[in-house]
Image (cartoon, helix red, strand yellow):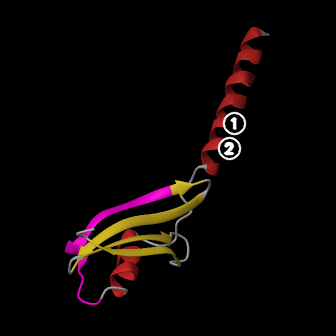
Amino acid sequence: MKKKVLICTLLTSLLLLCACSDNTKNPTTLSEVAAQNIALQEIPGATAENIKVFRLDNDNGLFTYEGTIIYDDQKYEFEIDATDGTILEWNMEPIYD
C-alpha cells in the first residue's frame, strides 16, 4: 500500500511539474535578429555593430527585447514587443549629456 501511495505521489508531482513548466515557456515569435533589424531600421546608417545592449526581458508575462544603440553621437534606447515587433518605447539623447 505504501508503494502505491509513493508512486501516486511521484506521478502527481511529475504532472504538476510538467504543467508548471509549460506556463513559463517563452512565447516569442520574433527572433533576436529580426528585433534588432526593426530597431536598426529606425536609425539610417546604423549597423549591428552599433548595438551595445540587447536582451530579452519578461515583464509580468510580456516578453520584450530591450536594447541600446550608440550611433552618430546619439544614444537610442528601445523596447520591442517580442511577439509582434511593435516598438513599445523609443528614446534618443546625445551621448554627451
State the residue at coordinates (72%, 30%).
Answer: 12
Residue 16 image label:
1
Q: What is the span of residues highlighted in magenta in the rendered image?
A: 44-57
Q: Is residue 81 above or below residue 4?
A: below
All told, the count of numbered labels is: 2
Local crowd at mark 2 within 10 Å, few (<14), some, or many (≥20)?
A: few
State the residue at coordinates (55%, 77%).
Answer: 84
The amino acid type, in three-letter code, at marker 1 is Leu
State the residue at coordinates (50%, 64%).
Answer: 64
The amino acid type, in three-letter code, at marker 2 is Ala
Of helix, strand and loop, which one carries label 1? Answer: helix
Q: Is residue 14 left or right of residue 72?
A: right
Residue 19 image label:
2
State the residue at coordinates (35%, 87%).
Answer: 41
Contact (CB < 8 A) between labels 1 and 2?
Answer: yes
Of helix, strand and loop, which one carries label 2? Answer: helix
- Report the Cα–Cα distance between label 1 and label 2: 5 Å
